[in-house]
Image: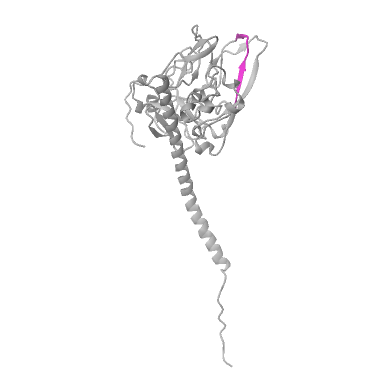
């Protein structure tokens, strides 16, 4: 009998080989995933920078039309002059630039002489995509809420809000109301300046009309029949004596990750009664937020959800990123429109 050898072809992996292949695939995915995430964040950051540039261009067009940069909001102050003693809850500067962002239909539904929360919900909650940073609110139509107290009685004793602002709530009236108003959220804020005017409860504090050292600031109103019809304080390009390429116009605003959509840190962007809704400051005493989980950052801080960087648009429309470790003295010089400090910037 002849010996025969049965040679059969193998058609499957062994268990050991299968485990090795799965391990290799897992390692490759682990190596590629951070690169994919980094590429996506880079794209989101570029989109965010483009938003800043479009908003900066819109503010320039507002200046070309009216002769001044859009005011952050109306704020008469603690002891307003006659004819400047109205307003304080009208819509913010973001409404004023809507016509220059191809949002004329939405802009026409806003009345800048009445409180922002008196507008229909569909108007208050509408938000152009250009107001949203994809790193924070990609694919969302975010809405937040603000609490407003009003009435017809005599102004009561001044109180300090979480924003540091001093207000005089109405007291003694029969129609005191508490309004919880909804409104669209946004990720960009105007440069209100630095802290040099002070924040100690006096009439010269930065959050009152005309006191801001930045480019988009609170202004005193001109009043007619108890309503504001024009800003008394106007920041023109000629007032930016430190140079348009060396002065912040707008930047990304800090919002803590655990306070997203919550008042007062992340309040409706059109809320002119709450300064941090649409404005931020920078300089000594107010650094950039290190990130969305920075416990030391303030609601007035600029900051982003991009790792290690916060982006700004300057008055000339240029956009650049700054390390979250940037010295506060440099930030203050860039936030103040006319402090006469020489700024030298390295490429980022």
Residue 12 seen by the camera: yes
Q: Residue furthest top?
A: 82
Q: Quadrant of the N terminus?
A: bottom right
In this view, the residue in front, 12 or 51, is 51
Q: Main secondary structure of the magenta part?
A: strand
Residue 152 in the magenta stretch? The answer is yes
Bounds of the magenta segment: 145-155
Residue 3 at x, y percent in the picture: 56, 89
In this view, the residue in front, 204 or 210, is 210
Residue at screen point 54% across, 14% down: 87
Q: Quadrant of the C terminus?
A: top left
Residue 214 seen by the camera: no
Residue at screen point 45% across, 46% down: 39
User: Looking at the picture, does residue 230 appear above or below residue 47?
Assistant: above
User: Looking at the picture, does residue 270 appear above or below residue 75?
Assistant: below
Residue 19 at x, y percent in the picture: 56, 63
Residue at screen point 52% across, 10% down: 224
Taking the image as shown, residue 228 lies to the left or right of residue 320, namely right
Q: Quadrant of residue 281?
A: top left
Residue 10 at x, y percent in the picture: 56, 74
Q: Quadrant of residue 283?
A: top left
Q: Residue furthest right?
A: 174
Taking the image as shown, residue 314 lies to the left or right of residue 152, namely left
Q: Residue furthest bottom?
A: 1
Residue 322 at x, y percent in the picture: 40, 34
């Amino acid at each position: 009998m002849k010996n025969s050898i049965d040679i059969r072809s193998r058609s499957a992996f062994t268990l050991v080989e299968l485990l090795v292949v799965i391990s290799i695939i897992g390692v490759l995915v682990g190596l590629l995933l951070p690169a994919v995430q980094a590429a996506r964040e880079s794209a989101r950051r570029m989109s965010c920078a483009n938003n800043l540039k479009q908003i900066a261009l819109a503010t320039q067009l507002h200046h070309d039309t009216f002769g001044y940069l859009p005011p952050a909001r109306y704020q008469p102050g603690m002891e307003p002059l006659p004819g400047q003693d109205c307003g304080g809850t009208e819509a913010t500067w973001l409404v004023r630039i809507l016509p220059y962002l191809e949002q004329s239909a939405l802009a026409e539904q806003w009345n800048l002489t009445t409180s922002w929360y008196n507008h229909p919900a569909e108007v208050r909650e509408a938000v152009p995509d250009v107001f949203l940073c994809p790193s924070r609110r990609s694919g969302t139509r975010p809405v937040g809420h603000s609490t407003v107290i009003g009435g017809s009685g005599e102004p009561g004793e001044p109180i300090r809000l979480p924003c540091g602002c001093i207000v005089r709530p109405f007291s003694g009236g029969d129609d005191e109301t508490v309004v919880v108003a909804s409104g669209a959220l946004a990720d960009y804020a105007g440069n209100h300046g630095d802290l040099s005017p002070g924040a100690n409860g006096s009439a010269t504090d930065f959050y009152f009309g005309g006191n801001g050292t930045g480019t988009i600031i609170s202004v005193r109103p001109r009043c007619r029949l108890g309503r504001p019809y024009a800003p008394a304080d106007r920041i023109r390009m000629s007032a930016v004596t430190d140079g348009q390429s060396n002065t912040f116009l707008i930047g990304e605003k800090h919002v803590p990750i655990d306070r997203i959509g919550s008042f007062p840190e992340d309040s409706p962007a059109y809320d002119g009664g709450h300064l941090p809704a649409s404005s931020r400051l920078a300089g000594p005493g107010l650094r950039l937020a290190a990130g969305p989980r920075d416990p030391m950052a303030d609601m007035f801080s600029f900051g982003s959800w991009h790792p290690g960087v916060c982006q700004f648009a300057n008055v000339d429309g240029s956009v650049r990123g700054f390390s979250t470790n940037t010295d506060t003295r440099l930030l203050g010089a860039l936030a103040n429109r006319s402090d006469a400090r020489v700024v030298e910037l390295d490429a980022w």
